[in-house]
């Protein structure tokens, strides 16, 4: 079958073996696949990426072997393997948590030498994890289930209370996923900040109450208007004189070195910072500043199967702005160019590959 393959440190379109279904597996045809920021990081420095995966206990990839990315997808059932219940008939559109059980245990689809991801014509999924896509839901939007589930998990992990003000820093796909989950749970006010005008428009479409351009003014200048003391001294004064104060929650959805320290320096005292942007490089912070301001960090990654299913259900009911997140689509031949475009995303949201 044809696939966009990571081979020799480059993404090329070539031919790989057709996948075969093992026990409990289903062969599916990839209908639409998203390109994740983790895919971009991996392709840019595959040896560094595989080293990180090994250190956190994920089965290591062999960089010398073919790897087919693609863990965000919507697919169609083609064939049932042995020991399957065949609950979903051939032709059913499905989404799935991107893991599969093979002879070596649990492996992540798209980051495995043995199980190709959705940047290929076909792939193998675990039958027990398949979720049927609602008939009314467009394939392109269904393919957003995985990245939007990341936001669902981050908001659940945040411990955000009703009426507690929050800020989403970075309005790329991850930040937009957070905004979608915040609005679905009725949280607010929701502030959002991004340098890109197009991404700020997407944040508005997803339901952010106020969308700010950091080039014009710091989003942290808004905290006092929301009942959040901006400095240690403001908080101390409010405490002494019985003033009501609120503790903000900030979602970091940029994932580049320097962001954590920037937030420590600029965030109000007693901020809770939920780190959902994936930075794969070493970073440094000034702990004294975080300690004196009593900054709390929570690091968020992935989602549970229940959160994944809830996200698909929510998409089926309608998520404002979700259809606008897909800004372009290409066939397999266009996958290498799409990766190159997303290195400097500019106005792009998601580019889908349609094998």
Image (spheres, rainbow, N blue to C red):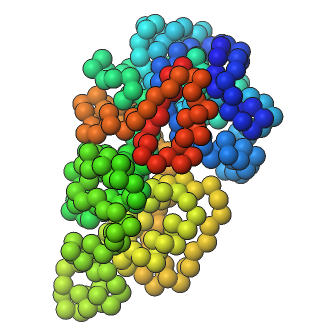
Image position of 172 with respect to 248: above or below: above
Quadrant position of residue 91: top left
Q: Residue at 70%, 20% (x, y): give it.
A: 14
Query: Which one is nearer the viewer's eye here, 218 or 295?
Result: 218
Image position of 110 with respect to 48: above or below: above
Name the spot of residue 20 as percent of width and height, x first.
Answer: 66, 13
Give the left or right position of residue 347, taking residue 65 as reference. left
Q: Quadrant of the N terminus?
A: top right
Q: Residue at 46%, 85% (x, y): give it.
A: 292
Image position of 172 with respect to 218: above or below: above
Q: Residue at 29%, 85% (x, y): give it.
A: 235
Image position of 319 with respect to 137: above or below: below
Query: Which one is nearer the viewer's eye here, 211 or 178?
Result: 211
Name the spot of residue 64 as percent of width and height, x first.
Answer: 81, 34
Quadrant position of residue 27: top right
Name the spot of residue 68 as percent of width and height, x first.
Answer: 65, 28
Q: Does the rendering let one see residue 305?
A: no
């Amino acid at each position: 079958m044809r696939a966009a393959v990571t081979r020799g440190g480059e993404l090329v379109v070539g031919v790989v073996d057709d996948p075969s279904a093992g026990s409990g597996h289903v062969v599916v045809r990839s209908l639409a696949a998203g390109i994740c920021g983790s895919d971009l990081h991996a392709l840019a420095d595959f040896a560094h990426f595989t080293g990180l995966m090994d250190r956190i206990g994920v089965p290591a990839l062999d960089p010398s072997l073919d790897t087919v990315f693609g863990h965000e997808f919507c697919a169609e059932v083609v064939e049932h393997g042995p020991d399957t219940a065949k609950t979903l008939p051939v032709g059913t559109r499905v989404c799935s948590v991107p893991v599969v059980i093979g002879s070596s245990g649990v492996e992540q689809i798209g980051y495995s030498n043995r199980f190709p991801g959705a940047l290929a014509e076909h792939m193998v999924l675990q039958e027990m994890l398949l979720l049927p896509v609602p008939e009314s839901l467009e394939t392109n939007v269904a393919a957003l289930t995985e990245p939007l589930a990341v936001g669902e998990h981050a908001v659940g992990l945040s411990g955000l209370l009703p009426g507690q003000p929050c800020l989403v820093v970075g309005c790329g796909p991850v930040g937009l996923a957070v905004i979608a989950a915040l609005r679905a749970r009725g949280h607010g006010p929701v502030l959002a900040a991004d340098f890109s005008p197009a991404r700020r428009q997407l944040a508005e479409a997803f339901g952010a109450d106020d969308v700010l351009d950091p080039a014009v003014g710091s989003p942290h200048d808004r905290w006092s208007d929301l009942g959040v003391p901006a400095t240690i001294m403001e908080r101390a004064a409010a405490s002494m004189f019985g003033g009501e104060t609120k503790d903000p929650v900030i979602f970091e959805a940029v994932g580049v070195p320097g962001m954590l320290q920037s937030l420590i320096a600029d965030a109000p005292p007693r901020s809770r910072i939920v780190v959902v942007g994936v930075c794969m490089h070493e970073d440094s912070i000034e702990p004294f500043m975080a300690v004196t301001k009593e900054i709390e960090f929570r690091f968020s990654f992935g989602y549970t199967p229940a959160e994944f299913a809830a996200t698909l259900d929510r998409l089926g009911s309608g998520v404002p702005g979700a259809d606008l997140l897909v800004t372009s689509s290409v066939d397999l031949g266009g996958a290498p160019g799409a990766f190159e475009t997303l290195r400097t995303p500019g106005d792009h949201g998601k580019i889908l590959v349609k094998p």
